[in-house]
Amino acid sequence: MVKIAMVAGQVNPLLGHGAHADAPPQGLHVHLAELSSALAGAGHEVVVYTRREDRDDPDRISAPGGYEVVQVPAGPPSPLRPDETASAMGEFGSFLDREWRQRPPDITHAHYWLSGLATQLATRSLGIPTVQTFHSLGTVEHRIREKTAMDASARDRIRLERLLARGATRMIATSSDEVFELARMGLPRTRTTVVPSGVDAVHYSTAAAPDTTRTRKHRLLAAGPLELGSGFDIAIEALAGIPDTELIIAAHPAPPYLSRRADEQEKSRLVKLARVRGVQGRVRIRRDVGRDEMPGLLLSADTVVSTPWHDPSGMLALQAMSCGRPVIATASGGMLDTVLDEATGLLVPTRSPEAVAAAARRLLSDATTRATFGIAGRDRVLARYTWDRVAEDTLRAYERCVPVRRTAHRTARTGVQ
């Protein structure tokens, strides 16, 4: 058994288990919850340290997945934006130092760069190995904004990410693309292990009941947060070149630190764009789509479209593949690994409505190819992207830092009876 300390100052894994009704259906909350559950199910002791956001919440919570959540009093007990959370990391790190002097883990695993700050502050004098996963890199986020000038906070983040990568015992990247980015930052590739995100192949399966409210012959589905970088505008512009097809945009609930007004502004922008492109009658935006609704929506689509500016995890593609649906995805980030071009879907250039339209016309005109891609996608998920498989890969990365004694592993959650 390995004693694992997960550090996630901005992410409460209980949201991933649906402890809150407005929890987003994907993202770091789900990643942390599912990975912690799988590691605990494999017989390891897992404690997750997250920042307290409600003064009435208990200090320690036993999560449904068999791990413990410690809510660290650092900063105000309320949701904070990422830039606001940075000021609380010194206090967070001091708590970890006190905690680990009394209750030392065998290994720590920091998620996101801010958590890495707190973790390395605590471990530098304790001699505890530290694994770091960024999930998203400041260099990439700045690059996808193209001509936007780099402000002081962005420069600080990039500088600190370099220091954290060098200071960590080992890096875990979520994609091959991230390995190359870390190498550009000066980190030897030999110090990095690729462990992708996973998907709950039972929840996202072909057994779910599909949504049947179709108004056109074909349906495309896009999903994600209602924000500019999600690339919904690319899908809307592509729709103008795809006849007799509707587009459903499944918008996830916004994080609590964002105002409802931001959602409304982005929705208004998309509605206006659909009107300008002459497809307003074929675009439907569904707000606050939760985790339970997603499988049915995925199964209702002929093809799933994932066109964000950048997606480190390829989560929507994984969900679609798990449900046996082909994917049209931008060739960037985690989707370069997740989607096998011409096997489980089609990869297209970023921000290219013309390429999306051409790919959609091809797939929508060929039911056999759609079915073949869908079967291959489901098989790929079961072989590579279940959370138990992700936990096994994570443990192999830990083994590069500390001895890991294997225990009886539970049956993988694949949905296969």
Image: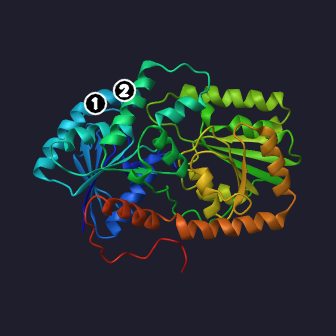
Quarter of the image with the C terminus in it? bottom right
391 horizontally vs 353: left or right:
left
With respect to residue 168, does 267 lie above or below? above
Q: Nearer the viewer, residue 402 or 84?
A: 402
Give the residue pinned by disc 1.
88
Q: How many marks?
A: 2
With respect to residue 28, does 271 lie above or below? above
130 horizontally vs 356: left or right:
left
Residue at left 32%, top 60%? Answer: 400
Q: Position of residue 215 (x, y in %)?
A: 82, 50
Give the residue pinned by disc 2.
84
Q: Amino acid at mark 2?
A: Glu
Q: Nearer the viewer, residue 52 or 391?
A: 391
Per the image, label 1 sits on a secondary structure element best described as helix
Check whether the beta carbons of the residues at disc 2 and disc 1 lie within 8 A of each other. Answer: yes
Residue at left 34%, top 61%? Answer: 64
Q: Position of residue 47 (x, y in %)?
A: 26, 55
Residue at left 71%, top 36%? Answer: 351
Of all residues shown, which one is farthest toward the bottom?
A: 417
